[in-house]
Amino acid sequence: MKDFTIEMNLAADAAEMDECVANFDAEMRRGLCGAGSLRMLPTYLDPCAIADASPEGRAIAIDAGGTNLRVALVDIGANGAHDILFHETRPIPGLRQEVSAREFFDEVAVRLAPIVAKSERIGFCFSNPAVALPNGDARILTFTKEVKVSGASGIVVGDALREALKARGLPAEKSVTVLNDAVAAQLGAMADADAREKRAAHVGFILGTGVNVCYAERNENIRKDEDLCGKPGTTVINTEAGGYDGFPEAEADRRSIAATADPARQRFEKMSSGAYQCDNLLEWIRLAASRGVFSEGFAMRVKGLKRIPAGEAADFCSSPREGGALTKLCANAPDAAKLRRLIEAFFDRIAFMLAVVLTAVSLRAGDAARDAELPVRISAEGSTFHGERLLRARLEHYMENHARAKFGLSHRFVRAEHATIRGAALAALAGR
C-alpha cells in the first residue's frame, strides 16, 4: 500500500509545499489580470471600511449553500452584537432534482415571505460562482456542487429575487447585496474581532459541500479592473479556489471527476470538498484493488460497493463498526491495515492541498501574515472542516509544522457564531 500511494501520487510530500504555494500564488496573480483557472472575483467590498463603520440595524440574510437554503432576520447592534429574530433552514432547490432558475428564485421568495416586510435590506450569501457588480448585485456564472439549476448563467441575483417577490405579491423594492459564502464568513468573523485583532490579516475559508477562500487584496494589484486598480485601499477577492487546476491528478481522481455533472470545472473542489470525498475515496479503493494491493476476496467484494456512507471512513480508522460498509470489505487483518493506510493517505493529501491554498492566500493577505504576535485569522466554516475527524488534525499539522516553519506564517482558525448569516447582514447594512 505504501508503494501504491507513492506510485499513484496519493502520498503528500511536504517538501513540495514551497513549489505548490508558489504555483498557487502565480495562478492568483494571473487571475487578478483576468487569466488562469482562478477567477479571482472582486467583491467591491472593503472589509476594513465595513469593520470601522460598524453598521447597525435590521437586515434580512439569505444563505444559499451547497446543501441548505437558510433565511434569517438579523438585528446588528453596537460593536457587531447580533440577534437572530427569525431563522429557517430548508434543502437548497436543485439538489434533489433539477429546477429552472425561475423555480429556484421562486422558492427563495416563498421562504422570505414571513420576514420580507421586516427590512428593506437583504444580504444574499450566494455560494456559487458569480461576478460581483459595483452596485452590490452579482451576475451568476454557474451553479456548482452538483446543484442543478437550468438557465441561471447570466442572471443578476438581486433582479431575479425582486422579480420572484413581485410575482408572489410580496414587497419587492429591496436593496440586495450579494456576496460569496467565504466573503460572508470573513466579514462575520471580523465583527467578533477586538480592536487589535482587526489589524490582523483576515481570510475567509469554506470547506463543506464545496471549498473556497477569500482575502483582501490591494486595489493596485487588481489589474483586470481599471477602476479598482486606480484606487487606494483594499477589496475582498473571492478566489473561487475550487476551480484551481494546478494540483497533480491521478487516475482515480480523473475517474471520479469524469462522473460529475460538469467534469471540466472545479477540479480542485472535486478532489477535496465534502460533496465528492466519499465517491473519490471509493475510486481510490477500487483502483488499489484492481492493482492487486488487496486480497482477491476484498477485490470481489468492493465491486459490489456502490457508495461509502458519510463518516464511515473516520469510523473505520478509529473504531470499525461491525457491519459497516468498509468493515465488510476486510476479511483479514492485512486488508484492514492496508485500507486504513489508504484512507489516511487520502485525507492527508487533501489536508496538504488545503494547507497550500491557505498559505498562499494568507501570504497575499498582507505583511501582518508573518507577525507571530498577530496571527492570520482564518474564519473557517463548513461541515467538512468542522466534522471530518481525519482531516482537521492533518490540516493543523501542515499549517503549524510546514506553513509556519517554511514561510513564517502564524495563523489561527476562528469560528464566529452564525458567521455567514452575520456577514450577509453586515454587507447589506454597509452596502458597497
Image (cartoon, rainbow, N blue to C red):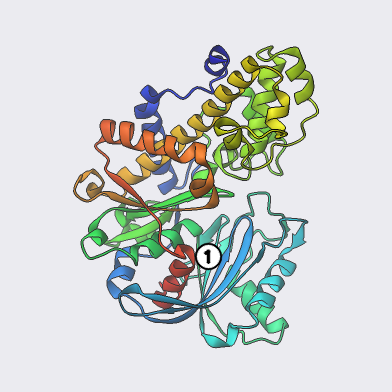
Residue at image mark 1: 125
- Residue that sits furthest to the front in the current view: 322
Is 17 above or below relative to 266?
above
* Camera-nearest residue between 192 and 252: 192
For the C terminus, the quadrant is bottom left
Query: Residue at 68% of width from left, 54% of height from top?
Result: 147
Can residue 103 be seen here? Answer: yes
* Camera-nearest residue between 145 and 1: 1
* Camera-nearest residue between 423 and 50: 423
Q: Give the image quarter of residue 328.
A: top right
Name the side, left or right, on which 383 lies relative to 213.
Answer: right
Crowd tier of the residue under label 1, counting other residues whose Cα lies within 10 Å: few below 14, some 14–19, many 20 or above: many
Query: Residue at 72% of width from left, 83% of height from top?
Result: 168
For the N terminus, the quadrant is top right
Query: Residue at 44% of width from left, 69% of height from top?
Result: 422
Is 227 above or below relative to 370?
below
Is 303 above or below relative to 49?
above
Q: Position of residue 212 (x, y in %)?
A: 49, 49
Amino acid type at mark 1? Cys
* Camera-nearest residue between 43 and 62: 62
Is 358 above or below relative to 281?
below
Determine whether the residue tagged by mark 1 lies in a helix, strand or loop: strand
How many numbered tags mark residues here? 1
Q: Position of residue 382 (x, y in %)?
A: 51, 52
Q: Position of residue 40 (x, y in %)?
A: 45, 50
Query: Residue at 41% of width from left, 43% of height from top?
Result: 28
Name the side, left or right, on which 111 lies relative to 182.
Answer: right
